């Protein structure tokens, strides 16, 4: 109760020369919404940062506050919705309203080779974006670890369960499962 909350829309965060775009759902009510930075200050942030650090995408394995020294390496984090939605379920209108923000970020990140969509809503939103850009997406189905390569110049798309507490505490998403996704991404970037 004594925490001060940011409580405003969030922008993305990371390396502007990134090759990996991490696309989440929205700022967590007591994570990014509180701290003012995507994937910071909550359980999903801790789970994700440990994995990203193992693969060299961050300089540290924690993400606690905006002044904790976290730096992204070759990765940039953003979300399809800019504010914490009620019950963590953004409305279609909210997704449509925020689309211009994350798609603009994508345009300002010319080096992106892979989009890692965290969760079905982020994945489906990105697939809809591709479809609206004129790309064939009928075969793109959300499945943890699914890897899709749209025609150039679009980056590859990789799906993962979201690192929410609901998924990590129930074993739906384990560290090994997230590592397998990050391994695919690293192999793709190195090929």
Image (spheres, grey):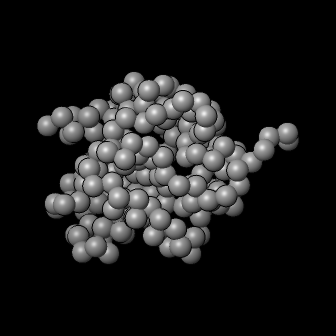
x, y percent for residue 140: 29, 60
Query: Between 153 and 16, which is closer to the camera in this rendering?
Result: 16
x, y percent for residue 168: 55, 35
Residue 95 to residue 176: above or below: below
In the picture, the quarter occupied by the C terminus is: top left
Residue 168 to residue 61: above or below: below
Residue at the spot x=60%, y=38% of the render?
Answer: 66
Residue at the spot x=31%, y=45% of the render?
Answer: 17
Residue at the spot x=39%, y=24% of the render?
Answer: 54
Query: Between 170 and 36, which is closer to the camera in this rendering?
Result: 36
x, y percent for residue 77: 45, 47
Residue 51 to residue 113: above or below: above
Seen as rendered, the residue at the extreme left is 191
In the picture, measured across the screen, residue 169 lies left or right of residue 15, that is: right
Residue 149 appearing in the image: yes
Query: Between 16 and 35, which is closer to the camera in this rendering?
Result: 16
In the picture, the quarter occupied by the N terminus is: top right
Q: Quadrant of residue 187?
A: top left
Residue at the spot x=33%, y=54% of the render?
Answer: 109
């Amino acid at each position: 109760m004594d925490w001060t909350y940011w409580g405003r829309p969030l922008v993305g965060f990371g390396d502007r020369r990134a090759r990996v775009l991490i696309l989440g759902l929205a700022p967590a009510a007591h994570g990014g919404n509180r701290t003012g930075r995507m994937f910071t200050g909550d359980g999903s942030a801790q789970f994700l940062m440990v994995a990203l650090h193992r693969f060299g995408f961050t300089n540290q394995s924690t993400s606690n506050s905006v002044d904790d020294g976290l730096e992204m390496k070759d990765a940039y984090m953003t979300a399809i919705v800019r504010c914490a939605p009620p019950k963590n379920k953004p409305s279609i209108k909210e997704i449509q309203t925020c689309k211009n923000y994350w798609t603009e970020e994508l345009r300002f990140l010319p080096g992106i080779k892979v989009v890692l969509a965290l969760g079905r809503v982020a994945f489906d939103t990105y697939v809809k974006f591709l479809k609206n850009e004129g790309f064939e997406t009928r075969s793109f189905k959300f499945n943890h670890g699914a890897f899709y390569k749209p025609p150039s110049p679009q980056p590859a798309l990789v799906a993962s369960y979201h690192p929410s507490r609901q998924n990590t505490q129930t074993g739906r998403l384990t560290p090994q499962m997230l590592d397998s996704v990050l391994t695919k991404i690293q192999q793709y970037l190195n090929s």
